Image (cartoon, rainbow, N blue to C red):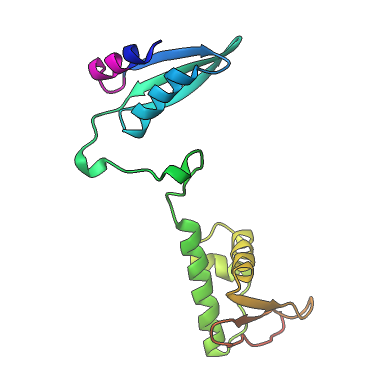
Amino acid sequence: MKPEQLHSWATRARPGDDVVYATGARPGDVISAAVRALHASGVVTMTSKRIPGGFRFIAQRLPDPRPSQLRTRKAGNRGHFTRRCDGAKLSTRIVLRLLKRAAARGEPCPTNAELARAAGLKDALAASYRIRRLVKDGLIQVEEPGPTERRVVTIAATGQRTRRAML
């Protein structure tokens, strides 16, 4: 398909219509540039399907975006996925808040299972991951005193520590 044909199709097509713009190992540079331009402007979405001997490259017409839906993309972000949901960051902040509360009250450090329950995480492994992220980010320091004692967490910002306790 030629770029002029693609643009003509895009102006006539209804939302949900699709067209195969190339087949083979990869589309040509000219048609690729045309499809990327339509994709960047929010007119089409691109996909591909594996077929014997290569791929079928498909453009699907999107609904005309409302002015509130138009978005601008940063040029430096091309080819990288962006996170749309900050759920991991939110749950990490919740775990940090729980640790700060325990340190401020002089309580023992909550176990991973307790943190998972309080933060609404899937399991203790998810809480352990959040603890490792907080250590890596320099927000807390963790001491593992031994197999029969709970860990001691020091909050970097305040210097407060959780109380050492037996399991």
Q: Nearer the viewer, residue 2 or 104?
A: 2
Q: Quadrant of residue 17?
A: top left
Q: Position of residue 165 (x, y in %)?
A: 69, 85
Q: Quadrant of the N terminus?
A: top left
- Image height of 50 relative to 132, above or below: above
Q: Let me know if residue 9 is in the magenta part.
A: yes
Q: Residue furthest left?
A: 67
Residue at 47% of width from left, 44% of height from top?
77
Q: Nearer the viewer, residue 101 or 120?
A: 101
Left or right of 65: which side holds 165? right
Left or right of 163: which side holds 144? right
**Magenta: main secondary structure:** helix
Q: Position of residue 37 (x, y in %)?
A: 36, 29
Q: Position of residue 92 (x, y in %)?
A: 52, 65
Q: Nearer the viewer, residue 161 or 159?
A: 159
Q: Which residues are magenta?
A: 7-16
Residue at 27% of width from left, 23% of height from top?
15
Left or right of 11: which side holds 35? right
- Image height of 35 relative to 160, above or below: above
Q: Residue furthest front?
A: 30
Residue at 42% of width from left, 43% of height from top?
75
